[in-house]
Amino acid sequence: MSIHEVARRAKVSIATVSRTINGVSTVTPQLSRRVWRVVEELGYYPNTQARSLVSGRSRIFGLIVSEITNPFFPEIIQGFEDIAVHNNYEILTTSTVHDPKRIALSVRRMIERRVEGVAIVTFGMEEALFVDLKTRKIPLVFIDVGPPLPRISNIRIDYQHGIRQAVQHLAALCHERIAFISGPLILKSAIARQHAFTESMDEIGLAVDPHYLIEGDHTMEGGIKAFKKILNFPKRPTAVICSNDMTAIGVMRQSYEEGIHIPRDLSLVGFDDIRLAQFMIPPLTSIKMSQTEIARMAFNALLSEVQRDIPSPNGSEYVLRTSLVLRDSTAMAPMGGRKKIASLKM
Amino acid sequence: MSIHEVARRAKVSIATVSRTINGVSTVTPQLSRRVWRVVEELGYYPNTQARSLVSGRSRIFGLIVSEITNPFFPEIIQGFEDIAVHNNYEILTTSTVHDPKRIALSVRRMIERRVEGVAIVTFGMEEALFVDLKTRKIPLVFIDVGPPLPRISNIRIDYQHGIRQAVQHLAALCHERIAFISGPLILKSAIARQHAFTESMDEIGLAVDPHYLIEGDHTMEGGIKAFKKILNFPKRPTAVICSNDMTAIGVMRQSYEEGIHIPRDLSLVGFDDIRLAQFMIPPLTSIKMSQTEIARMAFNALLSEVQRDIPSPNGSEYVLRTSLVLRDSTAMAPMGGRKKIASLKM
DNA sequence: GGTATTCGAGAAAACGTTTTCTCCGATTTT
DNA sequence: AAAATCGGAGAAAACGTTTTCTCGAATACC
């Protein structure tokens, strides 16, 4: 069972067994062979706990996501796991379901397991919850927090790029009245996206009717509700951009109920480009924010922080660019908004 | 940092600190208070590795799923995590992505971490990969394997119940020609579902055209492909039952392309009832197989196996019943199949 | 050929806990 | 009041590793 048993059977010391397993080069080939043979024979697997207790390295990273049942996150988890496996790290995943108690508990447990770093991929969070991690100087990586701090890296999302593309795309299709369904506005990221939207509208010279800025909650149900509100306006928009794909799916669902045809009567753009988007009816035009890239960046941020021996003054900063993916949920604006825009574009 | 530091500051022995933290009742309230004060002050969190090294209990369960990006699984993971948190267990999740090498590696790592049990929620698997776990007598729980074995529990899914309901429902809507898109037939579970279908058709006196049994692969792409095949038959079916919801979503997608209206021209039934089903267009009638229940059963199976001191001769067996959830993707069969069925039902 | 150096492998310490064993003072028993 | 019991807390062993230290033998050097 233990290294002692292996040592006994191979008639060597436990030190030699340890060295053999870890590939330390000072072991004579002859002894090494003898040890390996016994290891195979016994099916001996080293005890990671003992190993990390003495070495002080757990080879575990924590991964905190908002909600694993939101299709955005599984892709991140998968990406993170892929690269972790490749680097011989274990992952402790927590799905917070937006419960601060749950986060606090999870942070505590991660510290108890002595994780070497934690990736926090939740859009908008109470920073206070991570103070325990910070004081312990555990490397962290966030999405979209401010500039990097000691041991804390940041992945900045360039929302502007993709959203500008979306607005330009819609404008080119002669849409004038474009609504935006945001995420919950307590989230920094939601504000950033909405801001990028109004900014882009300004740039291109389109008016943003404040009525057309609806607050959603990043869920399908929220999308349904928000779209109902939109339908109550006297002047309905001809296009809607959603702050995430789930919201867009909600809009699709409700427009089906109401007999509004997408894209004939309404153009729709999502955000995130989850895998499902391409299988919607019709396939959803969306702004891609590569989950795989996020996972990769997050992992690398932690890994490089862990591997450097002289702690850097600051963590690293990565930037992820977003970009529009065209599918079938957008089309020429209905009725006669055409002329006005056409003139506007000259 | 360590228990020694706490002991030093509280002027007690490390044994007393350990006892205090673990709530052993023999500690004087006065000392206990003193210890707790220092613990708070220092922000001391016990080292789980040391703890489980000496206690021999890691408080970790493994969870192996097929593919975390398949919406069926996140709900299971979430359910499993919820109950694990509640019982103070950690989870090591692996998404195998159908790669045997990946499974083998993951099993190895779980053993190295000394997991106390593993839930294997992959529909159809190579049992050989888990032999290492078995020889180590680590409690396991599978979905739909045979009768329980020593330390190995089983969650049996009663496919028949839900599928019979679906067939009866369609028959009542006067459908005669019902197709079934199965999962990959190397999977036991796929065969079981298909078998339940033919069985149910027989029961009710409907013929099963062998052409109407199509093999899919549990993906949306597979659903699209399978449905294309179906459309090539001279006599098209009026209803399709799919072996999982992703397949059904593929069918929806393709029928949209082909201008086939669901449910007017074609009735469609899914399987699994993933959360998304209700947000499809139209909302998908599906056979529910509660993911939360599966997670709960799996966890409890492991926990009860771990907690008993005298190992039971066999693990436990649980049964999960499936049942039809009616939504809007099924309707009266088109054209004049009505009379025949009506007479048949009398 | 004798001394200095290198090299390989064992002994032992250390990691941070839990838990058994031991001991001492206080309480109960007769 | 002396003996027996009990209760609380410290000492120390144990868990399974890695790694430093030590030592002996073999090689290299002059």
Image (cartoon, coloured by chain):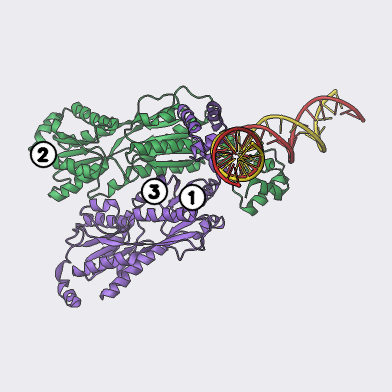
Chain colours: A green, B purple, C red, D yellow
Q: How crowded is mark 1: few (under 14 residues within 10 Å), some or many (20 or more)?
A: some
Q: What residue type is labelled 2?
A: Arg
Q: Position of residue B207 (x, y in %)?
A: 27, 74
Which quarter of the figure has residue C12? top right
Question: Label 1 lies in what chain?
Answer: B
Question: Label 2 lies in what chain?
Answer: A
Q: Residue at label 1? A: B102
Mark nearest the camera among 2 and 3 is 3
Q: Residues within 10 Å of mark 2 (few under 14, many from 20)?
A: some
Q: Which quadrant, please, contains the C terminus of chain B? A: bottom left
Q: Residue at label 2? A: A236
Outermost residue to the top: A313
Mark nearest the camera among 3 and 1 is 3
Q: Where is residue A108 in the image (x, y as percent from the top left)?
A: 43, 36
Marks 3/1: CA–CA distance: 26 Å
Q: Nearer the viewer, residue C24 or B314?
A: C24
Question: Label 3 lies in what chain?
Answer: B
Marks 2/3: CA–CA distance: 46 Å
Q: Vertical placement of B312 versus C5: above or below? A: below
Q: Residue at label 3? A: B83
Q: Position of residue A32 (x, y in %)?
A: 69, 45
Q: Residue at x 23, y 65 (%)?
A: B239
Q: Same chain for marks 2 and 3?
A: no
Marks 2/1: CA–CA distance: 52 Å
Q: Which amino acid does label 3 sit on?
A: Ile
Q: Same chain for marks 2 and 1?
A: no
Counting residues from the start of the chain, the first of labels 3 and 1 encountered is 3
Q: Vertical placement of B59 versus B40: above or below? A: below
